[in-house]
Image (cartoon, rainbow, N blue to C red):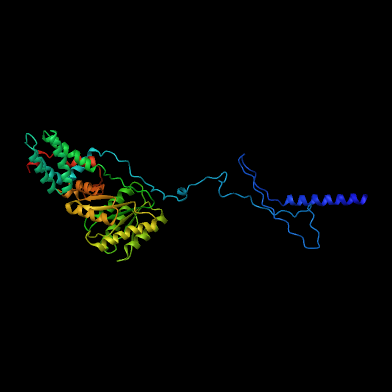
Amino acid sequence: MGSELIIALGVIAVVVAIILFARSNKPKLPPAKGPEALPPKAAPRAAPAAPPAGKPAASPQQPPPAAPSEPEISVDEPVRGTVELSQAELVAPPPPPRFREPESKRPSAEDLASLKKGLASTRGGFIARLSRLFGGKPEIDPQLIEQIEEVLITADIGTKTTQRILDRLRDRLSRKELTDEERVWASLRDEARSILGSSTGRLALKGRPAVLLVIGVNGVGKTTTIGKLASRLSAQGAKIMLVAADTFRAAAVLQLEVWGKRVGCPVVKGKENADPSSVVFDALKRAEAEGVDLVIVDTAGRLHTKAPLMEELKKLGRTVEKALGRPADEILLVLDSTNGQNALQQAALFREALPVTGIVLTKLDGTAKGGVVLGIVDEQQLPIRFIGIGERVEDLREFDPQSFVEALFERPDSETSAA
């Protein structure tokens, strides 16, 4: 009896020792937080293997210590305590540029006077001719409408836009609304504001680096426009890089470098006759690495009637998408206002090559054909971003439709009318 008691106490001691050993080797899991925490699921226990023939089965009182297992988490249920992200949030958008254009505001009296001075040649052209038509007439009749048509067409406003303006004048005339000269002027201003209403000088620059492609034919003032834009935006806090994609004209590269030194921004250029697309690609990768806000690309001037050159321009657009995974933020077409109707044709053909986002109209201070602004916006449905009315940096003006119409349709004084 005493020996049996000793054996029983020995078995109990062995079992207790096994249990304590198993507990000391069990992995410690962090305590669950909150009532919603789910307990880990136990790993499924493997079925015991059959004992070899002739040997007794292992005692169920002495199971081998269980291997530590990680808690199971279903892929279909959310992980507690984590932030759930949508697929759109997983693909982070490019950071915005570190600068913002100032809010548009009504130009000051000084700005308006400067604009009127810049448009003096245009007012001395078709506006002065219109004034002479209206002057001294006691009433407005249908014959006067035909004379207005001749003036507008010769002012390079364009046939389509001229007809739109005349149809509006005829409609008001039929309703007896054009009873005097002043009401005709008011009607012309209203129609011009209606045509230009969608134009704005604000650039849509969203990514970093934002990309601005500047295109146009030779001699319209692309490089000068780029320099003035760089100066304007650099003063607002932007880190800017200029790219000389015109690799065939050394003079164009040199001119851009002069502007780069003046503004204080780097100019990326390639070897002479290098592939413009490769120059742009390398510049964009460098801009990403250096945290540049805006890359302005000066493209080679090309005749809009030359198909191979226009194909090269399309390639530049594809290069931007390849380098950044998105298209250029803005594609500005620079047009020389002294070209009149030819500027309208250029706008149409360049739009076939690239999705132009806006127009820069230069040399308005040296032409009587400023009315071409109306034709470009009306026929091409493209906004005017900037206008050039002089050689100074500040003479590249953000386009404001209201101020432009006010300055353009100002009644000439008696001396101008008599000229």
Expressed as whole percent of the image width and height from the top left, the position of residue 275 reads: 32, 64
Residue farthest toward the front in the current orientation of the protein: 53
Question: Can the viewer see residue 48?
Answer: yes
Q: Judge by depth and name the residue closer to the eye, 297 or 314.
A: 314
Expressed as whole percent of the image width and height from the top left, the position of residue 29 reads: 66, 47
Q: Judge by depth and name the residue closer to the eye, 171 or 311.
A: 171
Expressed as whole percent of the image width and height from the top left, the position of residue 289 reads: 42, 56
Question: Can the viewer see residue 410?
Answer: no
Q: Judge by depth and name the residue closer to the eye, 165 or 185.
A: 165
| Image position of 60 (left or right of 367) | right
Q: Quadrant of the C terminus?
A: top left
* Number of numbered discs visible in the structure rendering: 0
Residue at the (64%, 52%) spot, across then down: 70
Residue at the (92%, 52%) spot, across then down: 3
| Image position of 162 (left or right of 310) | left
Residue farthest toward the right in the current orientation of the protein: 1
Q: Judge by depth and name the residue closer to the eye, 291 or 211.
A: 211
Give the answer, above or below, for where 32 lies relative to 18: above
Expressed as whole percent of the image width and height from the top left, the position of residue 387 reads: 23, 48
| Image position of 376 (left or right of 271) | left
Give the answer, above or below, for where 94 lies relative to 193: below
